[in-house]
Amino acid sequence: MAVILAAFALGLLFGAGLAVSHMMDPVYVLGFLDIAGAWNPTLVAVMAGAVAAAAPGFLLARGRRHPLLGGTFQVPTRRDIDARLLAGALLFGIGWGTAGLCPGPALAGLSTGMWQFLVFVPAMLVGMAIHDGAGRALDRRAPSAGSAAP
């Protein structure tokens, strides 16, 4: 129960931070991404604040064998840059640059009831489902690590 309450409280804090910092407002985000035009650098302060707030927690976690509330740390093991990563980054960038929304702020934006979020989030979920299906299909077609490729 402590894990659920902590996740809920931190989710509320994260959502409030997105709202207060205007990260849910596509106009601010698109202004930040428009470095060749009317660039709005205010979100640099948001990112700097996020890094400054998160850094002590990451340093504290590095010295622990398990999270404070139990379980195991979920640390990515892959560090390579492959075609799937680059394609995903490209698709994410196109979506972020045209809509001014990314998943976290879009989910938090549902609380506003604005039509943009009500359209974006289901479309994002469909895109995620397509990704999962395509990824499974690609994984089935890929040769296993121990076999020779034709």
Image: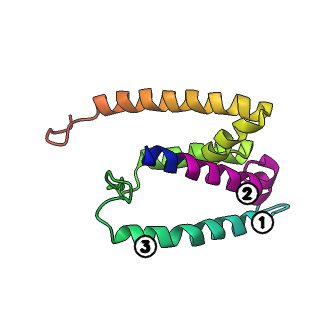
Q: Earlier in the sequence, mark 2 or mark 3?
A: 2
Q: Which residue is mark 3?
A: 59
As shown in the figure, which amino acid type bears the numbered disc 1?
Answer: Thr
10 Å neighbourhood of mark 2: few (<14), some, or many (≥20)?
Answer: many
SS state under label 2: helix
Magenta stretch, overall SS: helix
Give the image location of residue 43, x and y in percent: 73, 63
Q: Quadrant of the N terminus?
A: top left
Magenta stretch: residue 14 in it?
yes
Dot 3 surroundings within 10 Å: few (below 14), some, or many (20 or more)? few
The quarter of the displayed image where residue 41 is located: bottom right
Query: Residue sitting at 50 percent across and 51 percent down?
Result: 6
Q: Is residue 36 left or right of residue 94?
A: right
Residue ID for mark 1: 42
What is the secondary structure assignment of the residue under circle 3? helix
Q: Quadrant of residue 125?
A: top right
Residue 28 at x, y percent in the picture: 80, 54
* Alpha carbon distance from label 1 to label 2: 11 Å
Q: Amino acid at mark 3?
A: Leu
Mark in the foreground, 2 or 3: 3
**Image spot of residue 72 (x, y percent):** 31, 53
Instruction: State the quadrant of the C terminus.
Output: top left
Q: Which mark is residue 33?
A: 2
Q: Where does the magenta region start and end?
A: 8-33
Seen at 63% across and 49% down, the residue is 12
